[in-house]
Amino acid sequence: MPKKTTDKFASTFWPQVPAAVDGRMFLLSMGHFQATAMQAMLRYQIEVLTFIKNRSEHDRQFLEELLASDYARDGFDLYCSFWREALQDYSDEAERLTRLGSQMAAQTARQVRDDQEELTEEVATRMVM
């Protein structure tokens, strides 16, 4: 039979550590984490959609230039320069997304650490009282 506790702040899982009032700190921490994750996802989507828009414009411009060229040699040069620029654009975008991802991870880690420190301080305060 489980041992009953009379302390209204005592946790059933960790009896030696008082639980936050109604789990407020835990829910706030989870909300911060979810908001940061949503922000990261939206920033990634904006970045990717901007890249796709720019690449589509380059594709359209390439086709117009290709149709306007009169000689096969000009078409081959256009084709080679198009792929060179496309590969460079994709490489730059991969670098930008990687940098953005590391910044988001650092920001999320800071937020989680701050929430954890705040929760630790609250638990320490309750244990002293």
Image (cartoon, rainbow, N blue to C red):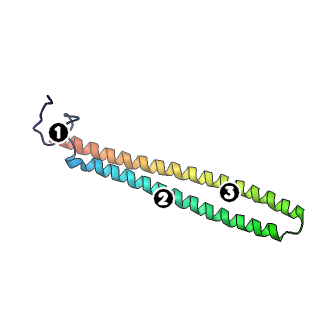
Which amino acid, mark 1? Ala
| Mark 3 vs 2: CB contact within 8 A | no
The residue at 9%/38% (across/down) is 6
Which amino acid, mark 2? Leu
Give the residue at mark 1: 10
Judging from the image, what secondary structure is the residue with disc 2 in?
A: helix
Q: Is residue 94 above or below residue 70?
A: above
| Mark 2–mark 1 distance (CA, rounded to whole Å) | 39 Å
| Mark 3–mark 1 distance (CA, rounded to whole Å) | 57 Å
Judging from the image, what secondary structure is the residue with disc 1 in?
A: loop
Q: What label sits on residue 42 in the rendered view?
A: 2
The residue at 53%/61% (across/down) is 46
Give the farthest residue toward the top: 1
- Nearest the viewer among 1 and 91 is 1
The quadrant the N terminus occupies is top left
Mark nearest the camera among 2 and 1 is 2
Label 3 Cα crowd, 10 Å radius (few <14 / some 14-19 / many 20+): some
The residue at 19%/36% (across/down) is 12
Q: Measured from the top left, where is residue 109 in percent x and y?
A: 42, 46
| Mark 2 vs 1: CB contact within 8 A | no
Which amino acid, mark 3? Asp
Label 1 Cα crowd, 10 Å radius (few <14 / some 14-19 / many 20+): some
The quadrant the C terminus occupies is top left
Q: Earlier in the sequence, mark 3 or mark 1?
A: 1
Residue 50 as seen in the image, left or right of residue 114: right
Give the residue at mark 3: 89
| Mark 3–mark 2 distance (CA, rounded to whole Å) | 21 Å
Label 2 Cα crowd, 10 Å radius (few <14 / some 14-19 / many 20+): few
Q: Measured from the top left, where is residue 108 in percent x and y?
A: 42, 49
